[in-house]
Image: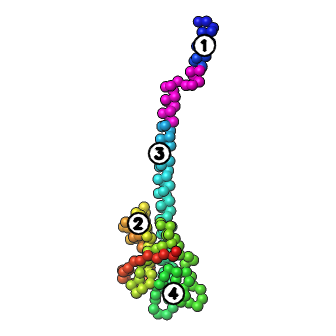
């Protein structure tokens, strides 16, 4: 082979290598597609995990807020002036008790429902009038189904968050709450 012929052959090979072998380009393309698929699956798994963790966080917040409402209703009821005990007529009664000349507060604010993001709650009406409990208006299925505290033991059989009713039941009063309603602070 002459020098000119070798040069042409080398030049042609170099140009062919710069562009890339069609088989190698296909392999690189398939590798890139595989990487994108694996990355997509990994990101979707992370998103599902993050969503589940966020719902668990909201559940813990709902349990804490529900307990605060229950305690505030209990304080309002037990600190009723006089002999006759009464439940608050409205959730805003827990913010400032008008039955006393001084300021009596049982809650700092009416909390938003962490499951719905709204300042709207379901109300459990007391048999003699007033509010004896609250519940979320969310119809989502709870993740948590065990390891509840004694007051919340019934939550383990709840089908939705709206079945988690945070009720103050005065000692010696075994009557079941007769009615539920909605309350909106907007």
| The residue positioned farthest toward the bottom in the image shown | 82
Mark 3 — residue?
A: 41
- Residue drawn at x 58%, y 17% is 12
Few, some or many residues within 10 Å of mark 4 (<14, 14–19, 20+): few
The mark lying in front, picked from 1 and 4, is 1
The mark lying in front, picked from 1 and 2, is 1
Residue 137 lies, in percent from the top left, at 43, 70
Mark 2 — residue?
A: 139
CA separation in Å, label 1 and label 4? 102 Å
Few, some or many residues within 10 Å of mark 3 (<14, 14–19, 20+): few
Mark 4 — residue?
A: 79
Residue 27 lies in the magenta stretch: yes
Per the image, label 3 sits on a secondary structure element best described as: helix
Residue 36 lies, in percent from the top left, at 50, 40
On screen, residue 157 versus residue 15, left or right, reads left
Per the image, label 1 sits on a secondary structure element best described as: helix
Task: Name the quadrant of the N terminus.
Answer: top right
Residue 156 in sight from this viewpoint: no
The magenta region covers 15-32
CA separation in Å, label 1 and label 2? 76 Å
């Amino acid at each position: 082979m002459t020098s000119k012929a070798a040069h042409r052959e080398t030049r042609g090979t170099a140009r062919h290598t710069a562009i890339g072998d069609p088989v190698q380009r296909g392999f690189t393309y398939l590798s890139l597609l595989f990487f994108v698929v694996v990355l997509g699956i990994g990101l979707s798994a992370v998103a599902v995990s993050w969503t589940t963790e966020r719902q668990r966080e909201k559940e813990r917040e709902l349990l804490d807020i529900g307990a605060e409402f229950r305690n505030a209703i209990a304080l309002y009821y037990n600190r009723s002036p006089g002999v006759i005990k009464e439940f608050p007529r409205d959730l805003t009664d827990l913010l400032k008790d008008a039955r006393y000349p001084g300021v009596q507060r049982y809650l700092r604010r009416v909390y938003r429902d962490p499951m719905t993001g709204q300042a709207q709650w379901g109300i459990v009406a007391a048999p003699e009038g007033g509010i004896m409990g609250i519940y979320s208006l969310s119809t989502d299925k709870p993740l948590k189904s065990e390891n509840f505290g004694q007051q919340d033991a019934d939550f383990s059989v709840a089908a939705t968050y709206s079945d988690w009713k945070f009720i103050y039941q005065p000692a010696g009063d075994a009557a079941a709450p007769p009615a539920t309603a909605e309350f909106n602070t907007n």
